[in-house]
Image (tube, rainbow, N blue to C red):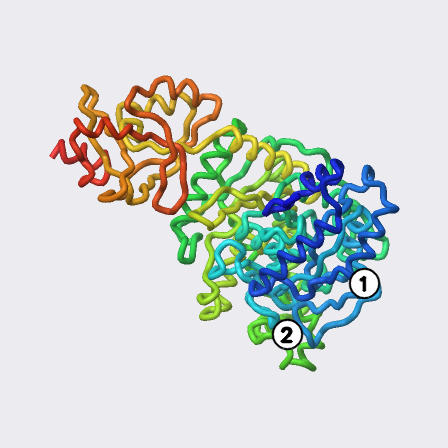
Amino acid sequence: MNLPEKLTIKWLREAYCASMLTPEAVVETCLARAKAEEEKHVWIHLMSMEEIRPYIRGLASKPRETCPLWGIPFAIKDNIDLAGVQTTAGNPGYAYLPKETAEAVRRALDAGAIPIGKTNLDQFATGLVGTRSPYGEVHNALRPELISGGSSSGSAAAVALGQAAFAFGTDTAGSGRVPAALHGLYGWKASVGAIPVKGVVPACESLDCVSVFANTLEDVLAVDGCVRGLCKDDPWSRTLPRLAALAPEHIYIAVLNEHDFYGPFAAQYHAAWKETVRQVQQLGIPVTMIDDTEFREAASMLYGGPLVAERWTAVGLFAETHPEKIFPVTLEVLKTGAKDQYSACALFEAQHRLKRLQMKLREQWKNAVYLTPTCGGTWTRDQVRENPIGTNTDMGRFTNHCNLLDLCAVALPAGQAEKDLPFGVTVFALCQEEHLLAGFAQMLENCRKDKMLLVVCGLHMQGFELEHQLLDLGAVFIKSVETAPVYKLYLLSDKEKRPGLVRVKEGGASIEAELWHIPKDRLGSFINEIPAPLGLGKIQLSDGTEATGFLCEAFAAADAAEITKYLGYRNYRKSMIT
């Protein structure tokens, strides 16, 4: 039985229950996929079948019915311990052989999960780009010229490439969310302390979280349910049970300025964000627009104040004695934590400011979630090499504040900014309000499942005579688009002067159109209103994607006037006025 390109816990469990697959066969496929993609630098240590086989044999004593992760292959970021396998934290000179397995990983193993190996990362979990590793730059799984996001770069790429069903990362300033967004994944970051960090190489010990990457919301919640809970040997661990998913009573949406979007795809990211906001506004629950002043204030304190000294506390001794063994840009960042200007008084002042900000949010956010883009853009790996600090800083604009303000968060896929360029959003909630994250995410997913994309290029476009038909059906305008340059546009010879789009083998052009979301259950009644020779078919867009839209039967063009030269019906109408 062939495995799908992307693995999910549900699919694997169903295949196991039907005796259509064995865990060994699944693992062998994951390893083969990983070896075939070695040039993407996803893994620091890919385990052999000999190393993995004891875990597979151990499944015989684990009842599949009571082990939610039975036979599920997973990846481990290489700053998280797996007994008997080196932990490097992205630095071969720092490497050690742990005798014990990290608590979160141990709990996953107890639930039946099977480790595949240790994944690449920005060294010492210091970075959001995935390029700061002597083991190689992790390539984006969809577009290799782009960054993978960091620091949990390899963990996200492993899931996106179908080399694991889920993966553990860490998240101090966004490392469990940024790579998720850049790979179209779900990135789960529970409240600080909810998942034990025992066995994790510290970055900022008081803020560090173990995060989870997966292809579905259901999967990240399943893993969270297996690994969450107090660990008596972990001083940062807390008892923070997750309640059943519940829809929030209020949603706060960040009011974003143009400069919050950056990089070579800033315009596409901005358009994707505006579409997400439109979708949220269709959910039927109150939406309040506020700014992100508190977020920005908290985020500025992570690297621009005394709190950065905690990173130096974690690895400062190693950095002082082995500076030549540290990635240059990583060493530059770590050294900012050793500045003499960061006094004890400055540290307490920062902590007091954070407490006041946390109190303000608790007053504002009762029964609410807060939504932002996960990233305001992305970069090519070449661009990051040219400006390693500035590009990395940009990637944290919407993430750095989270743990400082004691929030929980989940990164969600939100469509594509363009072909093979995922767009993602992050939902935030107060500590121990993960049930609101899950509730809102499920609402948004259901909304998307109930709608389909529709391309229109004539009288149904905004401002024209038949736009009301779409609006009456509850359709929502997304954005203006262009078709691929393989179409001609004709003015049909009827009293309404409707345009007709015809695909041609040669002589075509890119025609202006609009992309709308239309409820699927309304499509039937809409089709009944479409007169011949028009109908619905697949239209290829200029970005390479396809969507359902209006097409004209070719025979009708014989008696129609060609208006392709106007490159769109709107331009044709304007020409008639002038």
The kind of residue on which mark 1 rests is Ala
Q: Nearer the viewer, residue 359 or 132?
A: 132
Location of the C terminus by quadrant is: top left
Query: Could you say where residue 473 lies in the image, as x and y percent from the top left?
Result: 41, 22
Badge number at residue 199: none
Q: Nearer the viewer, residue 189 or 338?
A: 189
Name above or below for residue 350 compared with residue 113: below
Under tag 1, what secondary structure? loop
Label 1 environment density (alpha carbons within 10 Å; few <14, some 14–19, many ≥20): some
Name above or below for residue 84 compared with residue 547: below
Residue 121, picture quadrant: bottom right
Location of the N terminus by quadrant is: top right
Q: Nearer the viewer, residue 252 or 146?
A: 146
Q: In this view, which residue lies farthest toward the right? A: 61
The kind of residue on which mark 2 rests is Ala
Label 2 environment density (alpha carbons within 10 Å; few <14, some 14–19, many ≥20): some
Residue 453 shows up from this direction: yes
Of the numbered discs 1 and 2, the one sitting upstream in the chain is 1
Q: Are marks 1 and 2 in contact (CB under 8 Å)?
A: no
Q: Nearer the viewer, residue 308 or 183?
A: 183
Q: Is residue 486 shown left or right of residue 218?
A: left
Task: Give the distance between the C-alpha atoms of the residues marked 1 and 2, in whole angstroms.
Answer: 32 Å
Q: Which residue: 63% across, 61% down?
A: 35
Badge number at residue 83: 1
Q: Which residue: 77% across, 50% down?
A: 108
Q: Which residue: 23% across, 25% down?
A: 498
Which mark lies nearer to you, 1 or 2?
1
Query: Could you say where residue 31 lies in the image, as x and y percent from the top left?
Result: 67, 57
Query: Could you say where residue 5 lies in the image, as x and y percent from the top left?
Result: 59, 47
Query: Could you say where residue 78 lies in the image, as x and y percent from the top left?
Result: 69, 63
Under tag 2, what secondary structure? helix
The residue at which mark 2 appears reads as 338
